[in-house]
Image (tube, coloured by chain):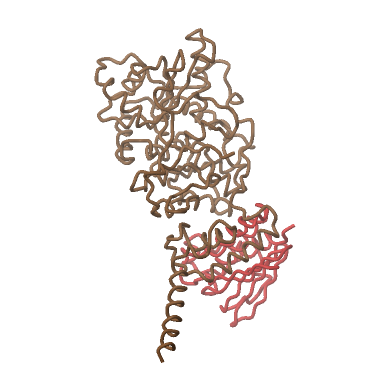
Amino acid sequence: MAEFHSVTLDFDKCRGCINCVKRCPTEAIRVKNGKAFIISERCIDCGECIRICPHHAKKAVYDKMSVIEGYEYRVALPAPSLYPQFNNLDSIDYVLDGLLRIGFDDVFEVAGAAELVSEMTRSMMKRSDCPKPLISNACPAIVKLIQVRFPKLLPHLHTLQPPVEVAARLARERAVKKSGLPADKIGVFFISPCPAKVTALRHPAGGERVVDGVLSISEVYMALLPEMKKIERPQAEQISGISGISWSYTGGEATALLLPHYLAADGIENSIKILDEIENDKLGGIDFVELDACFSGCVGGCLCIENPYIARTKVRYLRKYQPVTMSHLADYPGKEEKDFLFEDEVEYDPVLELASDPVKAMEIMLQIEEIEKKLPGIDCASCGSPTCACFAQDVATGKAELNDCVFLMKKELEGKLSGKEQNDGKATV
Amino acid sequence: MAINMRYVVDGSDFTTAGEASTAVKMKLKKLGIAPDIVRRVAIAMYEAEINMVIHAGGGVAEVELESDKIIIKLIDHGKGIADVDLAMREGYSTAPDAVRNLGFGAGMGLPNIKKYSDEMHIDTEVGKGTTVTIIINLQ
């Protein structure tokens, strides 16, 4: 069965150019018969192809706003990156109130849950059994990247659920109490900045689905804007402070741990480089590593509207008169760390392996090397694979034909033509 | 059946040092070699690669992957090692200050290679060069 991915292709809009093929950090896209296609098991839903496609043929699939109508009591879980989409926002309460006006009965800020995660992480990191460095699991594209490419680092992944899942659990419990309705009448919806979180929440690695739908920031923004303008005095009250709101950009999660030795980086290439360094034991003395697939972090997600750098500036403005932290575990009597731990470990997903049998894998690699010698090595991608090396692998594994290479074809044609000329010459003599 | 890889290690550029070991690491992952072994190869080879850049102005890395082991040879034509036993001592380094200021040359290179490999040979002659051979078993 093909796995679900939020990132998909609009077949009609695709012109078969190679922009996405070249950009994809996991070499998951090929062009075949004039159309791009995504190799499902390699896709990490980072959204790079959506950003680069000039024809808007790459799209993120998410739930439409109307999905909430199927539930009697609806709870919104806004990502912290929703707030800096708005201009001149003095208080988060306007956004929260707006959500109550567009059809939600309750709002639970993911930024509030993020503060709980920071609090629990701080105490986990004081214990001797905590791996060093501890690697954040908040960005699902990074988790997937580690899963397919850095199996040795899986034990370093944080074992606490990310803020959105913590928020979903607490929000549902609160909704049951508040509404008096049975759990299946309650719908909990995350408002997401990126396709990676859509995929991760619809088909969570741990198996258990904690939300009933995932909406996009861009669509919710459009619904919120006119309603927010009508608010004179917001009724809702925020449950997050500076540390929770700051999770919206790179470094926010790490600084909330109040540790001197952390590393925070953004962008897939930078992240790969840093994971390589950790794997090679070259990053000593670092206690915590936060990596975000998108530049600037979640505000850089491709379901956001505002430019990520402008959004960061707005976060700084928004944080100005806020308290540092507003949510504490003590606010949730009976809740403790173990209620929010993942039950299963994240497993290695060896999709990059050439074959499961090492001897077979070696045979294929030798074939790849032979094929590569014939190729021009200019990585033009006209064949539909991102590089000559990747094309050689596609040919060796039966996924492409050698004559898909336009340079080899040109050579062959030239050979035939000059042969023909000679023959023609002989014929006239 | 064996797979051979050959990389020229540029001795003039610190920033590209480590490219050969990164490329080998990626290939081993594609071959489905156990993650533990991949990591040992990557660390041992990286140390040897850096050594070649610091002390010998670069050289050549030859990697031979057999069904049961991986043999990595780092061949340079640098100044050679005068006292191998001393060079093997943890913390002993002849790296110039400029290199140490960059955070390299802590005298852990050769000891680390030994630690992460199953076999290690140093073949060296003062004035002629050094060949470091690293063998790591795949099982």
Residue A233 in sight in this render: yes
Q: Residue at x 25, y 15 (%)?
A: A232
Image coordinates for residue A50, horizontal then vertical, percent = 39, 44
Please name the residue shown 42% across and 34% down the image: A247
Quarter occupied by residue A123: top right
Q: Which chain is brown?
A: A
Residue in the foreground of this view, choosing between A351 and A64? A64
Instruction: Name the residue at 44% across, 53% down.
Output: A21
B136 shown above or below A100: below
**Residue A106 to residue A318: above or below:** above
Q: Is residue A285 left or right of residue B135?
A: left
**Residue A194, horizontal then vertical, whole percent:** 42, 36
Locate residue B38: give its quadrant.
Answer: bottom right
Which chain shows up in red?
B
Judge left or right: residue A410 versus residue A312: right
- The residue sitting at 26% across, 30% down in the picture is A87
B38 in relation to A73, above or below: below
